[in-house]
Amino acid sequence: MQLSASFGPMIGLFLFWGLVPSLQAQTLLLDDFEGNVEVQSANGWKPLDTGAAVPLSAVVRVSGHGYAEFVEGSTRIHLAKDGSYRLASLAAPGKNAPRDLLNRTSHLVGAVLGSEGTGGGVPTANMGIRGAEKKGNTDNLDWEDDSSTETDPTAASDALVAQGNYTDALGQLNLALARSSDQSPILYLKKATVLALMGRAAAALRAAESVSLPPGSPELAGLNLLMASQGLAVGDFALAIQKSQAGLKLAQAPEMVQNLELVEALGYRGQAKEPESRALLQKLVTEAGASPAGQDAARILGP
């Protein structure tokens, strides 16, 4: 919940999954951030850095076109927009985005980009982390390749994604971006996909904002699906609906269409628009009941 109307509508926040056992006792760690993140204290606002512990009862402020990811165990809270937030208000029951849906949509986008099922190994024994801007922030890892054999970091990243090694895959993509002369939008889309697979929805959306694809690009439907699902994860339901609808105008593969419809339905559900949500969910059950998206829709609708 934002504390003042001056901060705009309540968007960019979401409890990823897992119920909070005790609002007052639980401590969250600042796992990743960009811009400025502060916590309110008796003496004003105190700046936070990666790894800082804050109680769930705290009020935090994000500024400077920033974002923040707080984590404790399986609980992850995303703040994807500037504003002031009372963390305890994000722990209300019923704010859990289906993690299997978020993973499935990210894998679908990865398949479109050729980052899935590449198989094979990748030489990693001689690669080491040289440094990072912020402690614990793998988004800023600077990778050093000590081997005498030049490895294509993009291909290495694809192989690491196929192995489920997303942290090293992200490091390789950052290396590829550092070497790229044109800052390829496909590299940024790959990066956004890996961040989504890591559960870092706010960071994934920020990376996706850097993606500019020309009309007719085959990756456009995947970009819309990624942004829609991550919008759902951070609680930006308007974005989830907007990007789902944009993706549905482009998508042709049945599985992508079904997942776009499911994300749109959950976006309406987040906005408390039950008739619109139920209509889409029922359509999925009727037309694609055996698919993963259709099965999700049936579970959400209930008996």
Image (spheres, rainbow, N blue to C red):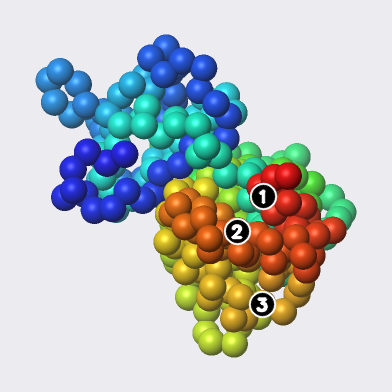
Residue 301: mark:
1
Viewer-nearest residue: 256 or 42: 256
Reading the chain from its start, which is encountered first: label 3 or label 2?
Answer: 3
Q: Label 3: which residue?
A: 251
Q: Amino acid at mark 3?
A: Ala
Residue 143: mark:
none
Viewer-nearest residue: 164 or 233: 233
Judged from this view, the residue extending furthest toward the top is 25
Residue pictured at 62% horizontal, 81% vertical: 250
Do tag 1 and tag 3 residues touch (Cβ < 8 Å)?
Answer: no
| Rendered location of residue 303, percent (x, y) | 73, 44
Local crowd size for mark 1, using a 10 Å CA cut-off: few (<14), some (14–19), many (≥20): few
| Rendered location of residue 25, percent (x, y) | 42, 12
Local SS, label 3: loop
Residue pictured at 51% horizontal, 68% vertical: 243
Local crowd size for mark 2, using a 10 Å CA cut-off: few (<14), some (14–19), many (≥20): some
